[in-house]
Image (cartoon, rainbow, N blue to C red):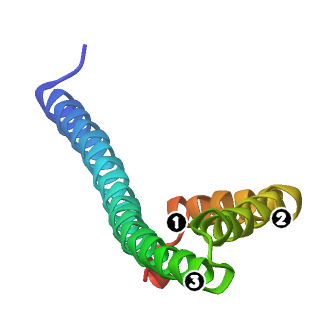
Amino acid sequence: MPNRQEEGLYDEVQQTVKQLVNDRLLLAKMEATEKLSIISGKVIIAVLAGVLLFFALLFISLMAGYFFSQVFESFFAGFGLVAAFYVLLLLILLAFLKAPLQRSIENGIISTLFASDDNND
C-alpha cells in the first residue's frame, strides 16, 4: 500500500506530465499559427502585386493596341496583333514553363512550412 509521500510524488509527476503535454500542444499551435501567418502574408502580397501587374499590363496592352491600330490603320489588326502576342505567350508558358513554375511554387510553400526559426524572412 503506497504511503502519503508516494501518492504526493505520483500526483506531482502526473501534474508535470499533464503540463508538459499542454505546453507541447500550445507550442504546436503557435508554430502552426506562425507558419500560417507567414504564408498568408506572402499570399496577400502576391495577390496585390498580381492585381497591380494586371492593371499595368492591361493599360500597356491598350496603348499597344491603339498604337498598332494607327500603324496598320485598322483597329482589328492592331488589337489582333496584341491578342496574338498574348496567345503566343500563353502557349510558350504552357509548353515550356508550366512544370518548372509549378515546382518552384511547391518548393516555396514547402520551404516556408518547414523553415527553421533561425532563417525566417
Query: What's under tag 3, amino acid-wise?
Result: Gln
Residue 78, labelled with which disc? none
Residue designated by label 2: 92
Q: Residue at x 51, y 59 (%)?
A: 113
Residue designated by label 3: 70
Q: Is residue 21 left or right of residue 95?
A: left
**Which x, y percent locates residue 27?**
31, 53
User: On the image, which quarter does residue 89 sit in?
Assistant: bottom right
Query: Could you classify mark 1 by the number of other residues whose Cα lies within 10 Å: few (under 14), some (14-19), or many (20 or more)?
Result: some
**What SS does tag 2 mark?**
helix
**What SS does tag 3 mark?**
helix
User: On the image, which quarter does residue 117 sit in?
Assistant: bottom left
The answer to which of 120 and 100 lies nearer the viewer is: 100
The quarter in which the C terminus is drawn is bottom left
> Which one is closest to the eye, mark 1 or mark 3?
3
> In the image, is residue 30 above or below residue 46?
above
> Which one is closest to the eye, mark 3 or mark 2?
3
Residue designated by label 1: 112
> Which one is closest to the eye, mark 2 or mark 1?
2
CA gap, disc 2 and disc 1:
29 Å
The quarter in which the N terminus is drawn is top left
Give the mark nearest the N terminus, 1 or 3.
3
**What SS does tag 1 mark?**
helix
Mark 2 in CB contact with mark 1 (< 8 angstroms): no
Q: Residue at x 67, y 63 (%)?
A: 80
Q: Is residue 50 left or right of residue 18?
A: right
Q: Is residue 113 left or right of residue 96?
A: left
